[in-house]
Image: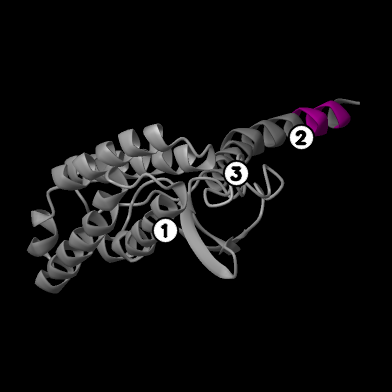
């Protein structure tokens, strides 16, 4: 009987030791595996904050296009241009002068296509300008090494009749800024027309 009790007591001790040293470690590892790997960002907080402001104003402009609200489009386009002007690209030159030169040219192209939106009165022409803004924003974000929240590059094959157009979104859900909710022909039936073609995020 004493031998049986001794064996049971020893088993309890062994199990307790296993629980303390092995089970704890396993739980900790599972916790780390559930978390995303930490990403070291190469840009300053100030630079990334400026890029975030640009994207926020871009997305607000896109939403105004969804509703075909020309006054709001102009307001958001103005804020977008201000955000673009406020971004200091100089730190890009510290690592690569060619990247800086490319980014500067892309910013110039973005502004050249955004500025006419402020003068246009026809929503279709404004949307054509927005298409070109988007076409320049996409490579710009890749050139600078965008470090913000995940973005989706989306496409509508019939944005302007037989002409396609792309735009950026912060969601994979399709909400079409070219056909929108208040299209003169389709009304809101083509609001979901499109597909995700690519994404931009830190890997």
The chosen color scheme is: one colour
Label 1 Cα neighbours within 10 Å, binned few <14 / some 14-19 / many ≥20: some
Q: The C terminus appears in which quarter of the rendering? A: bottom left
| Residue with the mark numbered 2 | 11
Number of residue marks: 3
| Residue with the mark numbered 1 | 128
Answer whether residue 15 is magenta in the image. Answer: no
The tag on residue 58 is: none
Horizontal and vertical percent position of residue 81: 23, 44
Q: Please report the residue visible at 54 percent of the width from the left and 67 percent of the height from the top.
A: 164
Q: Earlier in the sequence, mark 2 or mark 3?
A: 2
Q: Mark 2 or mark 3: which is in front?
A: 3
Answer whether residue 5 is magenta in the image. Answer: yes
Is residue 112 visible in the rendered structure shown here?
A: yes
| 3D distance between C-alphas at marks 1 and 2 | 76 Å
User: Foreground residue, 135 or 14?
Assistant: 135
Tell whether 106 sits left or right of 199.
Answer: left
Range covered by the magenta-colored residues: 4-9
Horizontal and vertical percent position of residue 159: 56, 60
**In the picture, residue 49 is in which quadrant?**
top left
The tag on residue 30 is: 3
Contact (Cβ within 8 Å) of mark 1 with mark 2: no
Is residue 45 visible in the rendered structure shown here?
A: no
Q: The N terminus appears in which quarter of the rendering? A: top right
């Amino acid at each position: 009987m004493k031998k049986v009790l001794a064996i049971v007591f020893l088993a309890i001790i062994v199990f307790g030791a296993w629980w303390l040293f092995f089970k704890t470690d396993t739980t900790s590892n599972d916790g780390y595996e559930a978390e995303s790997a930490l990403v070291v960002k190469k840009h300053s907080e100030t630079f990334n904050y400026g890029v975030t402001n640009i994207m926020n104003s871009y997305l607000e402009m896109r939403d105004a296009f969804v509703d075909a609200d020309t006054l709001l489009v102009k307001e958001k386009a103005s804020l977008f241009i201000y955000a673009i002007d406020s971004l200091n690209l100089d730190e890009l030159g510290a690592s690569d002068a060619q990247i800086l030169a490319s980014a500067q040219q892309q910013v110039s192209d973005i502004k050249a296509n955004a500025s006419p939106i402020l003068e246009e009165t026809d929503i279709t022409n404004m949307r054509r300008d927005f298409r070109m803004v988007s076409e320049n924003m996409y490579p710009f974000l890749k050139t600078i090494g965008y470090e913000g929240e995940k973005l989706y590059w989306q496409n509508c094959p019939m944005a302007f009749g037989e002409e396609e157009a792309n735009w950026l979104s912060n969601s994979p859900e399709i909400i079409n800024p070219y056909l929108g909710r208040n299209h003169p022909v389709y009304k809101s039936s083509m609001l979901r027309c499109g597909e995700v073609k690519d994404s931009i995020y830190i890997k």
